[in-house]
Image (tube, rainbow, N blue to C red):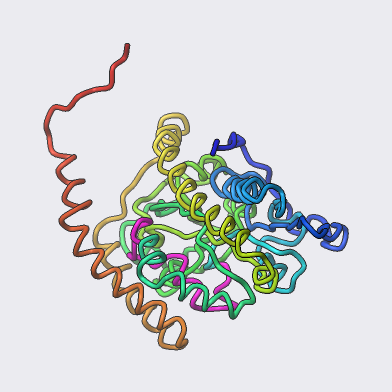
Amino acid sequence: MKRRQFIKGTAVAGVAGVAASSFPAPAISKDTMEWRMVTTWPKNFPGLGTGAELLAKFITEGTGGRLSVKVFGGGEIVPAFESMDAVANGTVEMGHGAPYYWKGKAAAAQFIASMPFGMTAQEQNAWFQYGGGQELADEVYKGLGCKFFPSGNTGTQMGGWFNKEITSLEDYKGLKMRIPGLGGEVVKAAGGNVVNLPGAEIPPALQSGAIDATEWVGPYNDLAFGLYKSAKYYYYPGWHEPATVLDNFINIQAWEKLPDDIKSVVESANTAVNQMVLSEFIARNNASLRSLVNDHGVVLKKFPDEVLAGLGAIAGKVMNDLASGDPLSRKVMDSILTFRKDAKAWSVVSETAFTAARHLDFPYAEASKG
């Protein structure tokens, strides 16, 4: 399958573009269906919006046009954070976003998205496929009136953009920061003032001073958004989102009406997109980071170990308290913690050990310049 040409740049969607009623209902005939997918992303935004477009392409082509999917950016039919409502109530059939955006509707969704100091992208995928994660996510999303698929992953994110240096946990007190999900709950517990904004609203909020700091994704997306124009310090690692699942959610009634062969195509398309989006982030992040530092003067900083340890301790307590208040959250978190324990044990002798070995000081072959 040929990868579509990813569109450079970004079109920033408005908060409430065009009323849903002005969009004609999907055409349905005996042999074809036309679905609409609303997203939380700006139209064709690199890696995220384009990942949704790729999913629509694979489904449409894989079904020979029997199920065609058209993608709408955040604000084109409904505001970004109303995407779940639009899918659940049947206004549209399909959506694409990130599970922690729906924590106000299902607290367990934020655990599915990413847990601070949790699992890597590959570990998350292994949990979905072989650790019972898919079944648990389906249980959570069924309560939202939807079918769930993992449909992309950002990989390890950056720690965020700040206009002051972070040297201790005290620096989080009073900090106005855009940070969603469980990471936001940790920052709040550390004394920060947390706000949740869809992607398109972040740059103007940071520029105007409405927020002091923000995380978004990583160099590839952050460069496209121009966040370097409004903040000086770029921190790593992304302790709050060591990997973040993107979700494809489908109205449960629309899903159940699909023939089995089309269901299989939708599932396979999501499996492919899930891996391809992650691969694109890995492929694009390094060059984007070089551009941020070399071309735009961004100051790259690592969180001090004592800050990371302090945030880790807060994270454990915050997540336990949140899970204790909701049986489904507890069920999901306990499953992740069990899988994470085994994954950590294996990583010590696999990826962690190899990465350390790769950084040892020895001569190595260089790519030919011929």
Counting from the top left corner in percent of width and height, residue 317 is at 34, 79
Camera sees residue 162: no
Between residue 153 and residue 206, name the one nearer to us. 153
Using residue 239 as the reference point, say whether residue 356 is left or right of it. left
Between residue 87 and residue 242, name the one nearer to us. 87
Between residue 280 and residue 363, name the one nearer to us. 280
Counting from the top left corner in percent of width and height, residue 73 is at 69, 52
Using residue 325 as the reference point, say whether residue 247 is left or right of it. right
Reply yes or no: does residue 169 show up in magenta. Answer: no
Counting from the top left corner in percent of width and height, residue 357 is at 14, 43
Reply yes or no: does residue 103 show up in magenta. Answer: yes
Q: In the figure, 60 relative to 138: above or below?
A: above
Q: In the figure, 300 relative to 249: above or below?
A: above
Using residue 264 as the reference point, say whether residue 312 is left or right of it. left
Camera sees residue 17: yes
Residue lying at the far top in this picture: please name it.
Answer: 370
Q: Residue at x 46, y 69 (%)?
A: 134
Between residue 324 and residue 66, name the one nearer to us. 66
Q: Which residues are magenta?
A: 101-123
Q: Residue at x 62, y 48 (%)?
A: 62
Q: Residue at x 39, y 37 (%)?
A: 286
Classify the position of the C terminus by image quarter. Answer: top left
Counting from the top left corner in percent of width and height, residue 27 is at 83, 57
Q: Residue at x 45, y 81 (%)?
A: 329
Classify the position of the N terminus by image quarter. Answer: top right
The part of the image, by quadrant, that contains residue 365 is top left
